[in-house]
Image (tube, grey):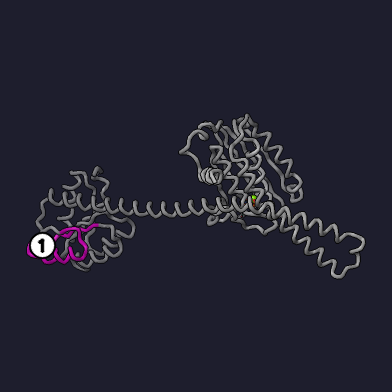
Amino acid sequence: MKYELENIRLMLVDDEEDFRSAIGRRMSKRGLNPDYAGSGEECLSFLENREMHVIVMDVKMPGINGLETLNIVKEKYPRTEVILLTGNSATCDGVKGIKAGAFDYLAKPIELDHLISKIKQAYEKTLREEEKKKNAELKVQMEQQMIVTERLASLGTLSTGVAHEINNPLAIIKESAGFMRLVLNKEEMKDIPRKEHLEKALDKIEIGVNRAKRITHQLLGFVKKQEPVCSEINIEELVKETIELIAKNARDKGIVFVCDMESSGIIWSDAYQIRQVLLNLLTNAIHAIDTKGGAITILLQDTETGVCLIVKDTGKGIPKENYSKIFEPFFTTKPPDMGTGLGLYVTRGIIEKLGGTIEVESKVGHGTSFIIKLPESNEIKENKDENKNIFSQILDKIKGD
Ligand SMILES: Nc1ncnc2c1ncn2[C@@H]1O[C@H](COP(=O)(O)OP(=O)(O)OP(=O)(O)O)[C@@H](O)[C@H]1O
Ligand SMILES: [Mg+2]
């Protein structure tokens, strides 16, 4: 194990000041940098501000003795290793110490080389424990990630499959509702009882069908357009076109658009899909701003490998606990007629397929920024099988079926 001795946070605890400083001086010459305490109490209050890797502590001290201090240290700071120093005739103290969790005990008078080698062994033990802990945490993290990935994969497969299946019956319902409305509007139906109720029921059917169609449209639009059709595109133009599409909705809410394009964003990518991404992000930004108005800023900059597009709003923001959820399918905080919860799921799928990344930064009450980085050309991504993201895998699976 390679490390510098000066990195060991070491403390010498002994009530004999002469002993402390003599040992400390000799240790410093060997590259160790100990802190000192003259009693168990002093040691414990020191630890509250700075944890130690190794403590070398005399057993016999006035006040709380070494064994009692050891018990408290082990309870509060289980990662700290303690080496006890016992009087020559008090080996039973050492044995008690080992039982209480001390790393080792040495009888006074001590031999410096021996003590230093024990300190190193104790420190190496703390390093191993630390490594073990990190590995265990990493394992838990990876397991959680796997669960999320698997859930998304099965949800994705299921939802795209369901979308396919549902489209036909939806069309039949919509057509039949239209036919019923036509019949209801005929002269001979003018005075039928509860005509109003029937009309209201038809309205509800139409609203429901439209919502279901929006869901299938998002999902199937993504499935159909799975393979990017690339050409040279100008993101600045795409932004302007998309803003025009939604300008009316924004105007109604008193929202202004600010475009700060340092680059025109000419890249080799898929215009249709980038437009869908812009539409999703801008619609979200409009929804996030309340009726008092606000601003949506679109920034476009060149990066070393392509372009960076930022869509920033002055809306209500996203609480931290929702950061990981917003890209999941069907996560929405909007009422049923406003959102399906698919916009960002689809958006991230597209961006990753195009070889880019999407990140979110937000502050509740202040606004949100979505930061998209796209490569100048996504050929490399397309050719590299191992880079395929979860969405392409889902789509491949569907294609294979
Ligand atoms: N700019 C934003 N400001 C605040 N919250 C946002 C913003 N963009 C997304 N969100 C949150 O993320 C959720 C998911 O967004 P997403 O676009 O995936 O679905 P949606 O907008 O609810 O529905 P739709 O499928 O119609 O887009 C939203 O319901 C909202 O809570
Ligand atoms: Mg949305």
Which of these two is toward me, 18 or 253? Answer: 253
Q: Is residue 186 visible?
A: yes
Residue named by callout 1: 87
**Count of labels shown?**
1
User: Residue extending furthest left?
Assistant: 89
Q: In the image, residue 71 lies at what x, y percent? A: 24, 66
Q: Return the residue nearer the eye: 32 or 324.
A: 324
Q: Is residue 39 left or right of residue 142?
A: left
Residue at 56% across / 37% down in the picture? 354
Q: Is residue 290 visible?
A: no
> Viewed as shown, does residue 176 lie left or right of 164?
right
Residue at (58% x, 49% y) in the render: 345
Residue at x 89% of width, y 64% of height: 189
Verify whether residue 65 appears in magenta: no
Q: Residue furthest right?
A: 187
Where residue 235 appears, as percent x and y from the top left, is 64, 34
Mark 1 Cα shell of 10 Å, populated few (<14), some (14-19), many (≥20):
some
Residue 238: quarter of image: top right
Give the image location of residue 36, x and y in percent: 23, 55
User: Which of the pair 268/27 is nearer the observer?
Assistant: 268
Percent position (x, y) of residue 383? 50, 33
Vertical position of residue 15 compared to residue 171: above or below: below
Above or below, 199 relative to 271: below
- The answer to whether residue 103 is magenta is yes
Which stretch appears magenta? Answer: 81-104
| 286 sits left or right of 132 in the view | right
Q: Answer above or below: position of 74 versus 254.
A: below
Q: Amino acid at mark 1?
A: Gly
Local secondary structure at mark 1:
loop
Residue that extends furthest to the front in the rendered view of this protein:
401
